[in-house]
Amino acid sequence: MNTPSLNRRAWLCAAASALALGAGSAAHAQAYPNKPIKMVVPFAAGGGTDVLARVIGEKLSAGLGQPVVIDNKPGAAGIIGTDAVAKAAPDGYTIVLSLSNALLTNQFLYEKLPYNPERDLTLVYQVAMGPLVLVVHPSVPAKTAPELLKYVAANKGKLAYGSYGLGAYPHLAGAHMSLTQDADMNHVAYKGEAPMVQDLLGGQIQMAYASALQAKPHIEAGKLKAIGVTGERRMSTLPNVPTLAEQGLKDEAYRLTGWLAVAVPAGTPKPIVQRLADEIRKATQQPDVQQKVAAMGFELKDSSPEAFVEAYKKERPVWERLIKQSGAKLE
């Protein structure tokens, strides 16, 4: 019998195959990219996510040696654009820069989500945390968060708040305020942040959570009033606006912040995922990017694929609990 020889031959064949696969993967990574990369933004042009994508995309293009083309696919709380990426070829040439709602919370809100973010996407890099500023139309007499709570409670069924999509943080936080104050506020969902702010300026809605990028010019012009910011720290670009938590709003809904991150279709080779992560990290370490992002009210993260996965696992149950408590459920 030649069993030892056969076993040895089988082992050598397996080892050779593994080496070939490894070499092929390495060659793939070295060849990547050799054509333009499409960065999908599942929200309308002009909003905070879109602007961040363009800032990061410009640096990525320089680092990767290929154009990074921004492709806005707004609608359905980021679902349309994110789904397009989830179903794209896993080759690193179609990526998404999106918000936490499309990459995490939508799976708890929608009964028929066309993609599963944990199955159909690979997390690449958590680019920035996105604290928001709660702003109101000047016709709202409140100047502080406690005053606003009293006002919405006293005007049951008369007020409306906006969001840039069903299930986005502004929707959840507004719904939480409406529920806890028994205010019966009307929720108006927009296809992006820019149109939401325009309607707030026009008085079609009375309040909204917005990025500093969109809200700050109107706050400074006196066209909007800043009530407070979400998260645990004040924004560096709005240092005089206190957090909602500082003002006594201690609920999780007011202390959480959404985030902006990059993901790719599941099955994308690890060397490509790592290459993208490395280039994004380099981009976020450049002083001009840091200045622009701080001015937008975002807080850059020092991330990696592994760190992003860990953060995702930690936040997942918190968001799931908040959504269940709100009773929000969408088809």
Image (cartoon, rainbow, N blue to C red):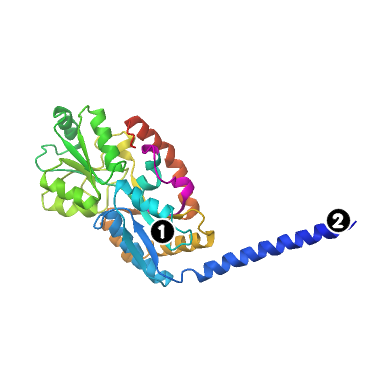
Look at 20% across and 35% down and name the residue there: 186
The residue range painted magenta reads: 108-127
Look at 50% across and 58% down and name the residue there: 268
Q: Is residue 239 above or below residue 246?
A: below
Counting other residues with Cα less than 10 Å from the Cα at mark 1, is it few (<14), some (14-19), or many (20 or more)?
many
Task: State the image quarter where residue 152 is shown.
Answer: top left
Residue 249 numbered tag:
none
Give percent across and percent down for residue 190: 23, 46
Front residue of 53 and 24: 24
Q: Is residue 259 magenta?
A: no
Look at 41% across and 58% down and name the residue there: 95
Task: State the image quarter where residue 57 is shown.
Answer: bottom left
Counting other residues with Cα less than 10 Å from the Cα at mark 2, is it few (<14), some (14-19), or many (20 or more)?
few
Disc with the residue nearer the chain's start (2 vs 1): 2
Which residue in the structure is indicated by mark 2? 3
Instruction: Count how many numbered circles sit on residues in the image.
Output: 2
Q: What residue type is labelled 1?
A: Ile
Whether residue 238 sits left or right of residue 321 in the image: it is left
SS for dot 1: strand
Give percent across and percent down for residue 125: 43, 55
Disc 2/disc 1 C-alpha distance (Å): 49 Å
Q: What residue type is labelled 2?
A: Thr
Whether residue 123 sits left or right of residue 215 in the image: it is right
On-image quarter of the C terminus: top left
Front residue of 312 and 88: 88
Which residue in the structure is indicated by mark 1? 95
Q: Is residue 109 magenta?
A: yes
Q: Is residue 224 visible?
A: no
Q: Can residue 268 be seen in this view?
A: yes
